[in-house]
Amino acid sequence: MFRKILIANRGEIAVRIIRACREMGILPVAVYSDVDRASLHVRKAEEAYAIGAAAAAESYLNIPKILDVARRCGADAIHPGYGFLSENPAFAQACSEAGIKFIGPTADAMRKMGSKTKARQQMEKAGVPFVPGTSRGLDSLEDALQAAKRIGYPVMLKAAAGGGGKGMRLVHQPEDLKSALEAARGEAQRAFGDGEVYLEKAILNPRHIEVQVLADEHGHTVYLGERECSIQRRHQKVIEEAPSPLVDAAMRQRMGEVAVRVAQAADYTNAGTVEFLVDAEKNFYFLEMNTRLQVEHPVTELVTGLDLVHLQIRIAAGEPLPFRQEDIQIRGHAIECRIYAEDPDNNFFPSPGKITLLLTPSGPGIRRDSGMYEGWTVPLDYDPMLAKLIGYGSDRQQAIARLTRALREYFVGGIKTNISLFQRILLHPDFQAGKLETGFLDRMFQTSSPAEAGTDGNPEDAKAAAIAAGIFSVLDPVASPGGQNGPANRSAWKKTARLEGLQ
């Protein structure tokens, strides 16, 4: 087993990996940019090293700096988390050449699956069902027009590299294809340094369902059930849950077996996710493979009882999977909300700044993976995700109820967050009925004002209650035993009143 692991990331995922290292008796090492010097992951790590300016290219994306820190601190391995360098084959290759274990797939597997066009070519060979489209990048507008005519409108332009909705454009008619192609190429080039774009048939308002796979270095591959990721805004996931309300046992097995075939076709090892689009007839099509740990991995952990980060580390250390497919059992239901520093009432405008008050939820079935603390200043330089709030229950209804209650307890002062948005989503009749598709949020926004949340989940009521609770916790003598109103300084009349009240 590794002695020391460097975490090449920041925020809540770095904190998550640090905790896993501690549980396994491994020393965690953090890296940080100039604006992250006071971040939670830096405070929690055994060691922390500065790696440069706030710009990601000068810090978290700077391969030589990260490898230099790994050498200097004596790290055996590097965990990339998600985002940044997690799906960069050059980084995985550089780690290997430096004699440092990369906790993830090989560089070769990443190259096969990291480019969506190359992945489609691999899946063609493996006989995996995928959405009709081009398996190579578009060379010209004429090439795009011919492909679109053959496939039939509407079509979707997609960046071959990366993800997160970057470089994607929906095209309904031929006259819009030129401008959409130029825009998709430009955005892909800026986001990923690769302007390659391909085209596929647009499945309007599909469900987005993904399957978690694990593969050790001894030839064993398993699937750990599916996650429903259909609640999206601009192709970015907002809420994820496991299992999917749509998927029954037979469909789960079919999707899982295809996902395993995808991983094996790429000679894949470690944790990965195979993503599918599902149409109204429950036909599913391969979309892409994410060659890393997913943001939404906690929902799978809760319904399987497995720790994916522990398993990632053990696989990277050469251990075989300690179970087989028949040992995997899905129990209960889990739903995750991504808490962002953004204002949903103002077109989701980013909201950096100092967190002046933080009231966090707890109680039965609640998990919170967080990278923030009261007094911390949220920077503008990175993705605005602050935390993930996950509700778990014996069934979907209990998970929704617990998560709804927890959201009412959650308050972040000093900045705006999207907590009120989740209150609206969870109370929506279609969500409660499991009627989900990728156009869900657009429909919800069209039928109600962003400020509306229903009388039973008004975020203003929750905010007022949270502020009152915060004031109470400061002023109440029991809540503040060492403060001005603590036991040592309580007045005689207050003591008398309390004693009389107990009689």
Image: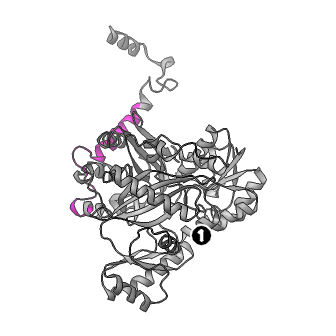
Q: Is residue 359 left or right of residue 61?
A: left
The location of residue 109, given as percent across then percent down, is: 60, 65
The location of residue 149, given as percent across then percent down, is: 34, 87
Residue with the mark numbered 1? 111
Q: Is residue 93 left or right of residue 128?
A: right
- Give the overall secondary structure of the magenta segment: helix
Q: Is residue 335 left or right of residue 120?
A: left
Kindly tell me whether residue 39 is visible in this rendering.
no
| Magenta-span inclusion, residue 455 | yes
- Seen at 27% across and 62% down, the residue is 445
Q: Is residue 19 left or right of residue 27?
A: left
Q: Residue furthest bottom?
A: 142
The location of residue 17, given as percent across then percent down, is: 59, 47
**Measured along the vertical axis of the image, is residue 82 above or below residue 286?**
above
Q: How many marks?
A: 1
Q: Which residues are drawn in magenta?
A: 445-472
- Seen at 24% across and 64% down, the residue is 446
Kindly tell me whether residue 101 is visible in this rendering.
yes
- Seen at 47% across and 44% down, the residue is 326
Front-lying residue, 288 or 163: 288
Image quarter hosting the C terminus: top left
- Seen at 54% across and 65% down, the residue is 265
Front-lying residue, 355 or 55: 55
- As helix, strand or loop, the secondary structure at mark 1 comes to helix
Label 1 Cα neighbours within 10 Å, binned few <14 / some 14-19 / many ≥20: some
Residue 177 lies in what quarter of the image?
A: bottom left
